[in-house]
Amino acid sequence: MTRTPTRFRLRRTACLGALLWACATIAAADARTDARTDGAIALANLDGLIEQAAGEPGAVDLLLLRGQFLADHDVLDRVAALTEPDDRGPASLLRRAHARAAAHRFYEAGLDLDAAQRAGASPDAVAAQRASLQIALGHAQDTLPALRAQAARRPGFGSHCALALAEAAVGHVEAADALYDAALRELDTTSPFPAAAVWFARGLMWSEQAGDPGRGAAMYAEALRQVPSYVPANLHLAELEARRGDNADAVAHLERVVAISRDPESLALLGSLHRRAGDAALGAREIDQARARFEELLQRHPLAFADHAAEFYLDAGADPERALYWARINLLARETRRAYTLAIRAAQAAGRIEEARDLEARRDAGFDARAA
């Protein structure tokens, strides 16, 4: 079996909450039983809606959705420009909290939710965003009672996805999968985005938490059937293909990605595979491009890319000290099991054995082995 670079075995899940929340909004706004729209057409329609809403508050969710599906990380700048100056009421504060959470500015997002609550925002709207924030910060256990009650009181796509994300985060994989399955059955929309997002979330959970890459790969493939240009699904499927030695299929998925996106993770894995195949010059160029893109993004949105950068520098970027620097920053931002594991690997690679042991003890004392 061919071994894929270890960097690509760890994934952040903080953005899943924002993605599923946005998809729930789409599903609620587009409830109808017509045939589902083709993924390519849906993406073109999304760009049209973004253009129509240019400069308007409604563009925020659309931009973030584009960012999630196409790994268009530059939308974070556009979203910040729309939301950072705007704190003129509860709706604006909720919108800014959502945008800041998407950039992993979790502390500031929490302050915005507090301010929105004081300003009279809907308690349900505040609670929904706060639950997503708590899950991203590694406190999913605290959200379960309220999310379970909400799902029982108002069963539907949104409530079941929110609860599934929390159940998965604490290691309840089977319960989460059943909830995702229920959400798909309840889905009634022409948009392919909600279904694709759920299939991706399930693939991530099974392949990276539950240790079932075959099941995960099938779910990534289903996400791509819904939206063929879905960049994270292409990337994650390529990682699994590379791990089992299907390098040609992996390269095909990654080449599809780099044709439409400047995603540095995809460039780095593609470079690693080209280097493995004997094309050292091409692989080195692609890894250099990934490094430059990571550094560009870290300058503008350090918390959003700290974990990804640490993984890159642990492997293709070949800089353990820089990996440890960004892994520590990521852990300060959110003490999840995944963040601890990344910091442990970085400390070990940098020769900080005592630090690694201390981090491992703290992680194992605080988290279930299958927690996110």
Image (cartoon, rainbow, N blue to C red):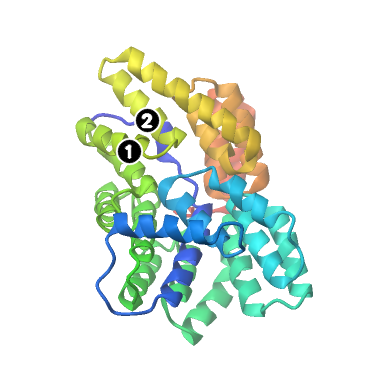
Left or right of 175? Residue 97 is: right
For the point 46% across and 27% down, which residue is it?
290
Contact, CB < 8 Å: mark 1 with mark 2? Answer: yes
How far across and how far down the image is residue 15, in percent?
A: 51, 54
Front position in the image: 295 or 39: 39
Q: Is residue 137 visible?
A: no
Q: Which label sits on residue 269?
A: 2
Farthest residue to the front: give it. Answer: 52
Vertical relation: 192 (above or below) 348:
below
Front position in the image: 17 or 297: 297
Vertical relation: 142 (above or below) 69:
below
Front position in the image: 50 or 111: 50
How far across and how far down the image is residue 65, in percent?
A: 47, 57
Farthest residue to the top: give it. Answer: 281
Front position in the image: 53 or 10: 53
For the point 40% across and 23% down, which residue is it?
286
Q: Is residue 201 visible?
A: yes
Vertical relation: 286 (above or below) 257:
above
For the point 39% across and 35% down, which residue is it?
266
Q: What amino acid type should be assigned to the residue bearing mark 1?
A: Glu
As helix, strand or loop, the secondary structure at mark 2 comes to helix
As helix, strand or loop, the secondary structure at mark 1 comes to helix
Q: Which label sits on residue 154?
A: none
* Rendered image quadrant of residue 39: bottom left
For the point 60% across and 25% down, which residue is it?
322
Left or right of 174? Residue 311 is: right
Residue placed under numbered mark 1 in the picture: 239
Mark 1 or 2 closer to N-term? 1
Crowding around mark 2 (Cα neighbors within 10 Å: few <14, some 14 to 19, many 20+) is many
How far across and how far down the image is residue 270, in percent?
A: 34, 29
Vertical relation: 284 (above or below) 260:
above
Q: What amino acid type should be assigned to the residue bearing mark 2?
A: Leu
